[in-house]
Amino acid sequence: MASKMLLLFLFFVAQEQYKLVKGDTSLIKRTCKNTKYYNLCFSSLKCDPSSPTADSKGLAVIMVEIAMTNATSTSSYLSSKLLSPKTNSSTTLKMVLKECADKYSYAGDALQDSVQELSDENYDYAYMHISAAKDYPNACHNAFRRYPDLVYSRDLARREEGLKHICDVAMAIIDNLDW
């Protein structure tokens, strides 16, 4: 009998957990409809377990955190390229990869600052930091352009585009907050 009660209890707990994760997506849908990249916005927010209970400002924070993850990951990726045996022979490539890793690191720092500004409800400053983070990949791309012999890889181009789109989504969400 005790095992049946335990099983019944676990069933109800599991149902409640499912409801919490499934959550109400209406705010997410309404928020994402006001962005340039609805699918990116919706899929990103839907995957985050805290989004069903977040308000609009919380959804902006989640998108900024996703952008931070992208920037940090890209900075690490570029830093790892510095250690690659292929890179050892080219001081120019090393210099550009280092510059790019730094730019993506700065983007992560700017995004971290924007989270603080969002929590302080300084939406204009949060927006400014996100805008700066969105622009840092351009400096990386331009560094590659300065040296025609260097190849700007498709992977790096995808990462650049991803960060820019995520930042666009975060800025659009902030645009719709009550300032």
Image: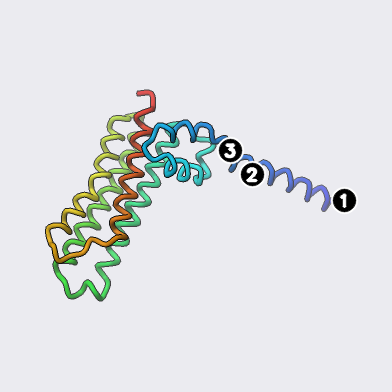
- The label number, if any, that marks residue 1 in the structure image: 1
- The label number, if any, that marks residue 18 in the structure image: 2
Say if 82 sits above or below 103 in the image.
Answer: below
The 10 Å Cα crowd at callout 3, few under 14, some 14 to 19, many 20 or more, is some
The 10 Å Cα crowd at callout 2, few under 14, some 14 to 19, many 20 or more, is few
Secondary structure beneath label 2: helix
Which residue corresponds to the image point at 35% horizontal and 56% vertical from the top-left?
73
Left or right: where 49 falls relative to 130: right
Left or right: where 54 falls relative to 123: right
Which amino acid does the dot numbered 3 rest on?
Gly
Q: Quadrant of residue 23?
A: top right
Q: Quadrant of residue 173?
A: top left
Residue closer to the observer: 133 or 25:
25
Q: Earlier in the sequence, mark 2 or mark 1?
A: 1
Which residue corresponds to the image point at 26% horizontal and 39% vertical from the top-left?
131
Residue closer to the observer: 11 or 1:
11
The residues bearing labels 3 and 2 have C-alpha atoms spaced at a distance of: 8 Å
In which quadrant is the C terminus drawn? top left
The percent coordinates of residue 17 (x first, y second) are 64, 44
> Mark 3–mark 2 contact, CB under 8 Å?
no
Which residue corresponds to the image point at 30% horizontal and 45% vertical from the top-left?
164
Secondary structure beneath label 3: loop
Q: Earlier in the sequence, mark 1 or mark 3?
A: 1
Secondary structure beneath label 1: loop
Which residue corresponds to the image point at 34% horizontal and 44% vertical from the top-left?
165
Point out the frontmost of discs 2 and 1.
2
- To which residue does mark 3 refer? 23
Say if 6 sits above or below 24 in the image.
Answer: below
